[in-house]
Amino acid sequence: MDIWAGYRRRRMLTWAIPAAVVFIASLLALTDRYNGPWVFIAAVITFGVLYFWFERWPCPRCGKPFTHPKRDLTFSQKCCHCGLDLWKQPEHSGTRHQQRH
């Protein structure tokens, strides 16, 4: 089982969905069907909600949020709490489960 699959999925959705909304809004802006900035506002709100979800992805080693929202708007290269490098397997696979309960 890939412990980083959830991280990859959250990261991709956090950036891809708002980008797709902005792209669609840009296409609509070229037509007469566009009626204001609501699609762009929706994209910003969608990004905010998804980023909030993304930044709370738990580190496989310590169980605390992997990213540091005040430091990273893109992608952390290591856990801001325990230092686990991105894409590395934790030394003890059961650690996160034990610490969270």
Image (cartoon, grey):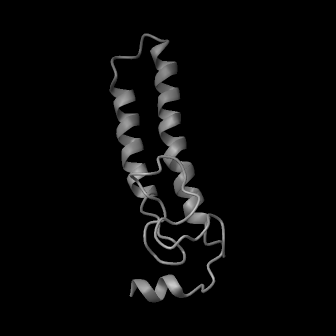
Residue 60 position by quadrant: bottom right
Quadrant where the C terminus sits is bottom left
Task: State the residue in front, 37 or 8.
Answer: 8
82 relative position to 86: left or right:
left
Above/below status of 1 relative to 44: below
Residue 51 lies, in percent from the top left, at 42, 50
Task: State the residue in front, 24 or 19.
Answer: 19
94 relative position to 39: left or right:
right
Residue at x 47%, y 46% (from the top left corner): 73
Above/below status of 14 relative to 61: above
Residue at x 65%, y 71% (from the top left corner): 2
Above/below status of 57 relative to 40: below
Above/below status of 9 relative to 97: above
Quadrant where the N terminus sits is bottom right
Residue at x 46%, y 56% (from the top left corner): 54
Task: State the residue in front, 33 or 77.
Answer: 77
